[in-house]
Image: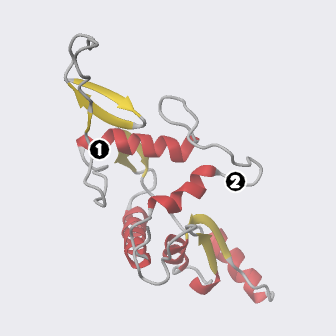
Amino acid sequence: MLTVRARGRLVRGQPGPPPAADRPVRPLQPVPLARPGAPLPTGTPAGAGCADEINAVYGTAATRGGAAAFAGWDRRTTEPGYAWLPQLTQGWTAREIRGFAAAARAENLAAPVGATQQVGSGKVTGWVRYYDQQQDLVEGLRKAGFDVWISSASPQPVVEVWAQATPTPTSRSCGTRPRCGSWSTGTRTS
């Protein structure tokens, strides 16, 4: 069995001699990781490569092979991985995204400092904390009469979940949003 990458997709076909002019070429057939509309199996051994690729593109703006993942963006104003992140949530409602974020938040807040978690074939930070200094700063600014807002490059439903444990109301949180579709309506984005 021969596996190659064509137009960004893994395809499989039978190896054989080069096609002769009088013999039709046998096309390679795509092998999807998941059915259209189904989540990618990034938490399984079969999906580890996919998780590794997503992690590389998000973190470095390049594929694992070193190719640029994004083009046409202004390095002074845009971190492309952050702009790409809301696109990864397409197909989910705001409620579903908030549910994922709440589960991740609870897991990472409960984990000991220094914990790691498996993502694809690698390990990443598996803990997080709200720092007292941040909470004190926000409270001090509010007492001094400032309108404090939370601004983040994370998707809006994720920011809302994290804002719940701060003195700043979630209505004063700003996250990134997709260009098309709507999380706020409760409908699935496309």
Which image quadrant: the C terminus? bottom left
How does the figure colour the protein chain or chains? secondary structure
Q: In the rendered image, which quarter contains the N terminus?
A: top left
Element class at badge 2? loop
Q: Where is residue 135 in the image (x, y as percent from the top left)?
A: 63, 75
Q: Which mark is drawn over residue 47?
A: 1
**38 with respect to 161 (left or right):** left
Quarter of the image for residue 37 reads bottom left
Q: Quadrant of residue 71?
A: top right
Q: Tell me which numbered mark, 1 or 2, is placed earlier along the sequence.
A: 1
Q: How crowded is mark 1: few (under 14 residues within 10 Å), some or many (20 or more)?
A: some
- Residue 20 drawn above or below residue 97: above
Residue 134 falls left or right of residue 19? right
- Marks 1 and 2 sit apart, C-alpha to C-alpha, by 29 Å
- Left/right placement of residue 83 relative to residue 46 reads right
List the residue tagged with mark 2: 78
Using the rendered image of the protein, determine whether residue 176 is visible from the camera's viewpoint: yes
Q: What residue type is labelled 2?
A: Thr
Q: Which of 51 and 5 is in front in this view?
A: 5
For the residue pair 30 and 39, the one nearer the viewer reads as 30
Q: Which residue is drawn at 62% across and 83% down?
A: 168
Horizontal side of 86 relative to 35 (left or right) equals: right
Please name the amino acid that badge 1 sits on.
Gly
Name the residue: 40% across, 51% down.
Answer: 115
Please, is residue 45 above or below residue 172 in the view? above
Q: Where is residue 70 in the image (x, y as percent from the top left)?
A: 60, 43
Q: Can residue 169 be seen in this view?
A: no
- What crowding class fits label 2: few (fewer than 14 Cα within 10 Å), some (14-19), or many (20 or more)? few
Q: Which disc, if any, is residue 15?
A: none
Choose top left, top right, bottom left or bottom right for residue 25. Answer: top left
Q: Position of residue 112 (x, y in %)?
A: 40, 57
Residue at position x 66%, y 69% from top? 133
